[in-house]
Image (cartoon, rainbow, N blue to C red):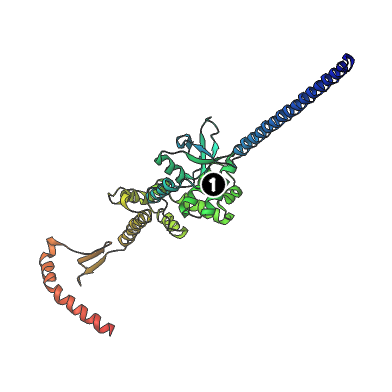
Amino acid sequence: MSKRTQSIRSLFAAGAEESQQSESRAAVQRVTSGAVRSLQDTFSEVEREYEALKQTIAEGALPVELNPLLIDPSPFADRFADRDTTAIDALKASMAEHGQEMPILVRPHPTEPGRYQIAYGQRRLRAASELGIAVKAHVRELDNDRLVVAQGIENSAREDLSFIERAAFARKLETAGFQRPLIQSALSVDRAEVSKLIAVAEGVPEWIVVAIGRAPKVGRGRWQELADLLKEGQSEAKVRKATTDRTFAHKGSDDRFAAVIRTLKASDKASKVATVAPLIARAPTGREIAKLSLSAKHCNIQISRERDEAFAAFLMSQLPALYENFNKDKSSLEE
């Protein structure tokens, strides 16, 4: 092979090798560029998902876990404190075994950064606190109006607030300056019912309501009866005495209500009996012989000892025969 031919072949071989290397470099660049773009797209997608997640959490759509110690009561509490721990103990056992199934609802505390106020879920919060675990909660920005409506909607769905809890809640909202239409929305009742709730709450002093508790089986009629009985003089003093009895605190809430009603009715009956004029027996000359006065449980016959002690002794000796004759006459009349 001539030198000229070899030179030409070498020239073409070098060109082909350089072309192949260029194509290889381009292919690598294309692969690298595609991988970078894919990685960039992945980062962008993750970032978008992260922002969407933050927004979702901010709107309260997803629950977060909070320390129960950071959550304060609602300023418009609608539920009384549970004295009966049976329901709480059952809830604690369920949460310990199965976890918390339903999140509570809270809002960021309006004046204390890092803290929250509960809208609903007080029992779940208490159970989590006593178990020493975090509580699952939806966190939402709620003004006072939306807070009380959220409480009302949740409680209306459960329908387990007692009458007096609803009445106390309605009065508390009105005292705080909320208008009747919003109170109606919070309790899912009409205007007339709101008026009845507030009227009863105003008729029973708060300390008596607290002493009795939620009384789940007691409806509006009996609470109205209590409010009417409390209008009598010295009635609150009588209730206070009843509530300090050593057995009162050990009764259930419905039984505490019944005890208060019994106390007031007994006092009312005694006062009515005391107003009845005593009966007076007189001799033909008009002189008083005996006086009959009535108390809640007894008929009292009073005879002057100084003047008629002998007559009183004679009367006592005759009473058995008189009583027997009375019963005979009574039986014959009934026949």
Q: Is residue 163 left or right of residue 242?
A: right
Q: Is 231 situated left or right of 28 in this image?
A: left
Q: Nearer the viewer, residue 193 or 100?
A: 100
| As drawn, 71 above or below 102 | above
Q: Quadrant of the C terminus?
A: bottom left
User: Residue sitting at 53 percent across and 34 percent down?
Assistant: 109
Residue at x 14% of width, y 74% of height: 320
Q: The residue under label 1 is which amino acid type? A: Gln
User: What residue is rendered at 82% in x and 19% in y?
Assistant: 14
Outermost residue toward the top in this view: 3
The single residue placed furthest to the front in the displayed view is 1
In this figure, which residue is indicated by the disc labeled 1?
A: 151
Residue 127 rendering spot, x and y as whole percentages: 42, 44
Q: Is residue 84 visible?
A: no
Residue 259, given in percent of the width and then of the height, sits at: 34, 56
Residue 174 percent location from the top left of the image: 54, 45
Which quarter of the picture shows residue 19? top right
Q: Quadrant of residue 325?
A: bottom left
Q: Looking at the picture, does residue 104 appear above or below residue 269?
A: above
| Relative vertical location of residue 239 with respect to residue 20 in this rendering, above or below | below
SS of the residue under disc 1: helix
Depth check, front residue: 259 or 99: 99
The answer to whether one can see residue 330 in this image is yes
Q: Nearer the viewer, residue 46 or 160?
A: 46
Q: Residue 183 at x, y = what percent?
A: 57, 48
**Residue in the image at 40% along x and 41% along y:** 131
Image quadrant containing the N terminus: top right
Does 62 sit left or right of 329 as displayed? right
